[in-house]
Image: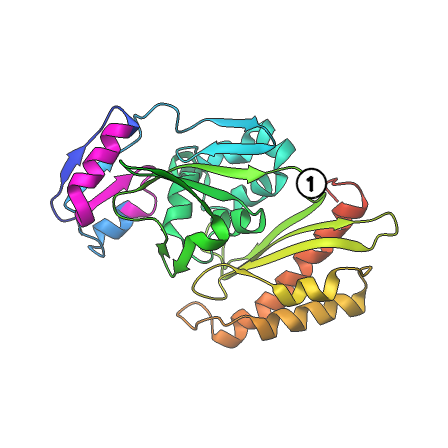
Amino acid sequence: MKPASFDYYRPDTVDEALQLLDEAEDEGKILAGGQSLVPIMNMRLATPQCIIDVNGLNGLDTIRYESGLMKIGALSRQRCLEQNNLVKEKVPLIAEAAPFIGHTQTRNRGTIGGSLVHADPSAEIPLSLLVLDAQAVIRSCDEERTVPVSDFFVTYLTTDIMPNEMLTEIQIPTEGIPQGYAFVEFSRRHGDFALVDAACLIDTDEQRRITSVRLALGGVDAIPVLSEDATELLVGEKLSSRLLEEVGRAVQAEVDPDEDLHASREYRRHLAGVFAKRAVRLAYQRAIQGGGTG
């Protein structure tokens, strides 16, 4: 099937792109990597009248570090996240998650901004940015605003971004970022959408007690979920087999997955417990080793 007819624009500046979005009202869509939008249009699940191709815009694909923030332009390709040395140094969780995204061809075109705005609840980038406490920089013709990723997701494939707005940058605070990190997921085949994925950040003290933890899971609700119960169980404790089992049970009780063609509700809940434990174990190992590869 082919998409419905549409008007195509390729602006030269961000301001021009925003003006086109404003004029299109609810009928405009941004085209970046196209890995989500194009298939949806081909199946006619979306029929925008105006496509605004932002691939020619300068400055939206830069990756830099400024004043304690990793600043990643929304047009940065997922393959760059996987390979960029600054990303590996400052936010290695992102570099670890990126290879799970589709296949190399997918990552060559797909962008960090496109993945975040598409907001698939099992996608690797939204989950990683949630656990990293990142912020989304959003622009319209009239203003620029910054939204915590924890407030960005509304429901399945729906975010806080308005039809006349465009995501321009992701900012990740790195001051005091935990040493221990982990990203794990389960899919039927490599490159398939994850049934369940988990991302974790952990810091420990000299006695190997956990001082901070952020555990997030994808594929278990309409949006990625931060586990508050896991935090309550883990902070102040040394990780043990018994404690890890408690975390798995707590996560299983906390999540509310849907049933679909790929997995039952019960199976997704089971996977949530299993992969929560794997993420916590690996992040803890790296934390007590000083952030090594474990």
Q: Is residue 180 above or below residue 214?
A: above
Q: Within the image, what quadrant is residue 20 found in?
A: top left
For the residue carrying disc 1, how many other residues have a C-alpha within 10 Å: few (<14), some (14-19), or many (20+)?
few
Which residue lies most toward the right here?
207
Front one among 84 and 21:
21
Q: Position of residue 89 (x, y in %)?
A: 64, 32
- Secondary structure beneath dot 1 equals loop
What's the residue at 47%, 57% (across, down)? 122
Chief secondary structure of the magenta span? Answer: helix
Image position of 274 (left or right of 259): right
Q: Position of residue 106 (x, y in %)?
A: 40, 41
Image position of 7 (left or right of 106): left
Q: Within the image, what quadrant is residue 66 found in?
A: top right
Residue type marked 1:
Gly
- Residue at the spot of label 1: 176
What's the residue at 75%, 46% (across, down)? 286
Image position of 292 (left or right of 218): right
Q: Within the image, what quadrant is residue 197 found in?
A: bottom right
What's the residue at 55%, 72% (across, down)? 269
The segment highlighted magenta reads: 15-37
What's the residue at 19%, 55% (across, down)? 44
